[in-house]
Each structure stands twice: as C-alpha cells, then as structure tokens.
Image (spheres, grey):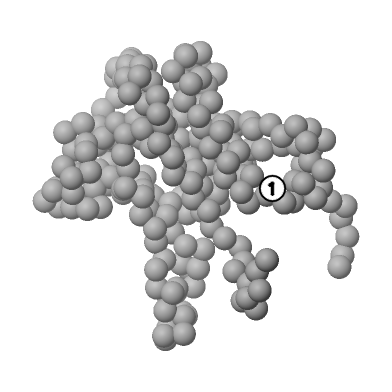
C-alpha cells in the first residue's frame, strides 16, 4: 500500500524486449523486404512500405515475430490496465494489428517527429543496423546515429515555463533508445518520437506497427456518468 501523500499520476510506459528468435527470423525478413525494394526500383535515403505487410505477406517469419509482438503488447497493456480490466470484468481480450510496415533508412535518412493515430499502442522492431559502437564513431552524427528519440508530454510547455530548482525534473524532456538488432520497443501511440538521422555501412531496417486491444464485449468498461 502506498502511504506517500504524493501521487505519481499519468505514467508514460515504454517496454523494451529482445526477441530470442531474431537470429533465425531477421534474415528471412530482410530477404523479403529487400526483394520488395528491388522490385520498386526506388532510390533515396528512406523507403517506407505500405502498412499492410501482414496482409500482403503470409510468411512464417512474420508470424513468429508478431506472436512475440502480441505478447509484448499485452504485457505493457496489462501493466497499465490490469486493475481496470479486473474491476470492469473484462474477459477474452484480443489484440488487433491495424497497420504494420517496414522502413529502410541510410545516408542521413530520418523520420521526423510524429505520433500514431487510430491505436492505443505502437512499436518498432530493429531488424538491421550497424553495431552500437560502430555507429557512435560516426564523425558527424556520433552517439545520436540512428537512435529513436521519445519526447515528453510537457515538451511544448518548456518554452514559456519558469524554471527553477523546484521543477528541475522537467528539463529532461527526451528519452533515447539505442537500437540493437532483435530488440522491440513498445510505447503509447500518442507519444511523440523521431528516428534520428542514420548513416552506416548497413541499412537501418525496422518494422513498425500500430495495435488496438479490445474486450469480448467491446471497449466500454464502465457506465457513463458524472462524479
């Protein structure tokens, strides 16, 4: 039981997990995605597929990866909502992937600040990129080479906010995830984030997705009313 009078409200959860089958699954997915890139005949710093790869590709490697992703989404969603689900009597929850796509990035390609709509959880899985120490030695990008940066909810308030030692904690307005092959990051879909510029010997290849979680009787947990 929390006896502190201070309530820590509205957390921003981020889950980071490593996929144990990455060594077998990643090469299969890379072959699949580079085949599509070659068929498109496109050149540039960033290639983004359409968001229907689970519809277009009935591939065992994709099925294995998204089984792992499903477990991770339920883990983070249960951590935040478990008590509410129990109180509301929610049963037989199911996850629905409403969009999944891959992106190939290099030569200072990046994905600017954005968030995701029409879902509760989003994620990025790192298929391929140069090792961490190699990326950090880049003469221009340094330690920021290819990282994923998340932005705090209060970021837009910092410009006009008074800062003193009483609210010094607000100065940390970003959180950086250092990508590694085989690592999955799941985060709330509303959270602003950016794929920082990347330049390396190997392309930075990722899979992104948007997910919804629904109850058997729909998404209404409680009766509407005013208190």
Q: Secondary structure at mark 1?
A: helix
Q: Is residue 140 visible?
A: yes
Is 82 left or right of 61, judged from the image as shown? right
* Looking at the image, residue 81 lies above or below residue 158: above
Q: Which residue is mark 1?
A: 82
Residue 113 visible to the viewer: no
- Determine whether, in the image, residue 54 is placed left or right of residue 41: right
In the figure, 160 relative to 221: above or below? below
Q: Relative to residue 177, is residue 88 drawn left or right?
A: right
Q: Is residue 23 above or below residue 150?
A: above
Residue ranking furthest to the front: 1
Q: Position of residue 215 (x, y in %)?
A: 75, 36
Please state the horizontal and vertical placement of residue 7, each as a whole percent of the image.
Answer: 63, 72
- Foreground of the two, 194 or 42: 194
- Residue drawn at x 68%, y 66% is 1
Determine the image quadrant of residue 27: top left
For the residue pair 62 and 18, the one nearer the viewer reads as: 18
Residue 94, horizontal then vertical, whole percent: 68, 31
Count of marks overlaid on the render: 1
In-front residue for pair 210/3? 3
x and y, in percent, of residue 31 in the image: 32, 16
Looking at the rendered image, the quarter that the C terminus falls into is bottom right
Which residue is pictured at 63% across the width and 51% down the height? 80
Query: In the visual, does 168 lie left or right of 110?
Result: right
Which of the 4 quarters of the picture holds residue 48? Answer: top left
The residue positioned 54% from the left and 57% from the top of the image is: 12
């Amino acid at each position: 039981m929390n006896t502190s009078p201070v309530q820590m409200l509205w957390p921003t959860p981020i889950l980071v997990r490593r996929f144990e089958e990455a060594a077998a699954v990643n090469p299969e997915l890379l072959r699949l995605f580079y085949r599509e890139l070659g068929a498109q005949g496109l050149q540039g710093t960033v290639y983004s597929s359409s968001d229907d790869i689970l519809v277009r590709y009935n591939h065992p490697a994709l099925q294995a990866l998204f089984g792992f992703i499903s477990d991770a989404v339920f883990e983070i969603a249960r951590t935040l909502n478990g008590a509410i689900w129990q109180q509301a009597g929610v049963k037989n929850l199911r996850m629905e992937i409403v969009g999944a796509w891959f992106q190939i990035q290099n030569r200072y390609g990046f994905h600017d600040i954005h968030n995701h709509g029409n879902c509760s959880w989003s994620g990025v899985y790192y298929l391929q990129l140069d090792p961490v120490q190699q990326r950090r030695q880049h003469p221009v990008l340094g330690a920021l080479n290819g990282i994923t940066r998340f932005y705090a909810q209060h970021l837009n308030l910092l410009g006009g906010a008074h800062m003193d030692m009483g609210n010094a904690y607000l100065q940390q307005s970003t959180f950086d995830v250092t990508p590694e092959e085989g690592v999955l990051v799941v985060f709330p879909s509303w959270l602003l984030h950016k794929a920082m510029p990347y330049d390396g010997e190997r392309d930075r290849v990722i899979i992104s997705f948007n997910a919804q979680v629904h109850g058997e009787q729909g998404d209404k947990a409680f009766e509407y009313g005013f208190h």
